Amino acid sequence: MPNTRRRARRRSFRLLHIPLLRLLAINLAIGACAATLLVGGLLWLNPGHLRELILADRAPGIGLALLLASFVITFGSAAMGSAIMAQGRKQEDDRGDGGSPSRLAAQKLPRRARPM
């Protein structure tokens, strides 16, 4: 019986050995922590009597869970998306040619004659 538990643990943690999934899991955790801090701050500051509205309901846990879940989805996906989009940035910055070609270059414009 103990061997089957060890095998199950090994299988479940194998997914974290894939670099992309590990990156997504870490950034999802970062987004979830930020969402939890923001919901806690909202409840603490009580803007628009939000805390009172949630706690005055018969089932305040449902409202709190929906609020927290929506913030976790939003901040978690934003953190994961920014991590994915930042993947190629290091290769572009290390080229040593002074920057990527997509950057705008300053150009001198000729002076226009003043109208009379």
Image: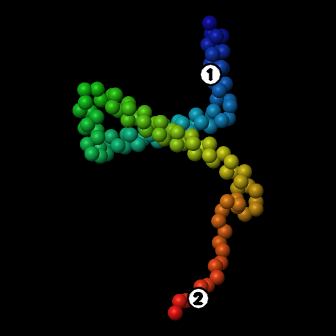
Q: Quadrant of residue 37?
A: top left
Give the number of the disc on residue 113.
Answer: 2
Q: Secondary structure at mark 2?
A: loop
Outermost residue on the front side: it is 116
Outermost residue on the right side: it is 96
- The three-letter code of the residue at mark 2 reads Ala
Determine whether 16 is above or below 78 in the image.
above
Nearer the observer, disc 1 or disc 2?
A: 2
Is the C-beta separation of discs 1 and 2 under 8 Å? no
Give the number of the disc on residue 68.
Answer: none
Q: Quadrant of the N terminus?
A: top right
Badge 1, how many Cα within 10 Å: few under 14, some, many 20+?
Answer: few
> Residue 95: x, y in percent?
76, 56
Outermost residue on the top side: it is 1
What's the residue at 63%, 16% (across, down)?
8
> Residue 13: x, y in percent?
63, 24
Q: Could you say which is closer to the camera, residue 98 or residue 43?
A: 98
Q: Quadrant of residue 40?
A: top left
Determine whether 65 is above or below 78 in the image.
above
- The three-letter code of the residue at mark 1 reads Ser
Question: Mark 2 or mark 1, which is nearer the start of the sequence?
Answer: 1
Relative placement, left or right, of 111 versus 37 is right
Query: Mark 1 = which residue?
Result: 12
> Residue 57: x, y in percent?
25, 30
Q: Quadrant of residue 7?
A: top right
Determine whether 103 is above or below 22 in the image.
below
- What is the count of numbered marks? 2
